[in-house]
Amino acid sequence: MAVVEELLRSEAEGAISFGNHKLTKKAKVEDYHHEGDLLKVKTYNEMTKLEKNGMFLYESVPGTSVQNFLETENGVEFVVEGDEDAQITIGLTDDREYEVFVDGRSTGIMKTGLGGKLSLGVELEAAEEVPVKIVQV
């Protein structure tokens, strides 16, 4: 899988790809229109952050490249790549339980608080790409 050279792009069936974990200097794309929403991405090797309509949606430390990020009414799924293990935070619905799948395996059920944020660790150092799926239970 390659980094997202354009930093943010629309994919088939409503998905987006964003981020470039290979950049040594911060780069951003603002006011990107995608299916009626306004997206903003900031990315480089230390951090990748995505906002939708001014609200938090995704952040990773260190930076990651994300392919086929797709939100559904029940959660989100995407494929992530990075040079080292990453801490990823996703903005979801407040006060809900979600089952988290990393590389096809359930890591358990997690609950979001009032801010709707869910954090997970993904081991990327030894993998080329890792699929992540978060489903409301």
Image: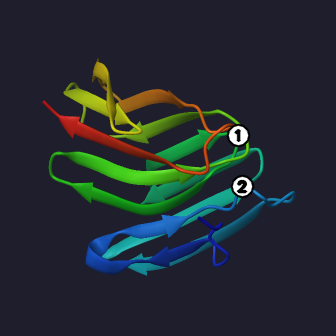
Q: Residue at x 66, y 37 (%)?
A: 126
The answer to whether residue 97 is visible is: yes
Q: Residue 4 in the image: state x and y as whole percent.
A: 62, 70
| Residue annotated with mark 2 | 21
State which quarter of the image contains the N terminus.
bottom right
Comparing 22 with 51, the one in front is 22
> At numbered mark 2, what does the secondary structure look like: helix, strand or loop?
loop
Write down the residue under mark 1.
62
On screen, residue 101 versus residue 20, left or right, reads left
Image quadrant in which the C terminus is located: top left
- Quick check: 136 above or below 83? above
Q: How is the image coloured?
A: rainbow
Q: Nearer the viewer, residue 13 or 53?
A: 13
Circle 1: is it few (<14), some (14-19), or many (20+) Cα within 10 Å? some
Task: Give the image location of residue 107, x and y in percent.
Answer: 35, 22
Instruction: Compare residues 3 and 93 and report the one nearer the observer.
Output: 3
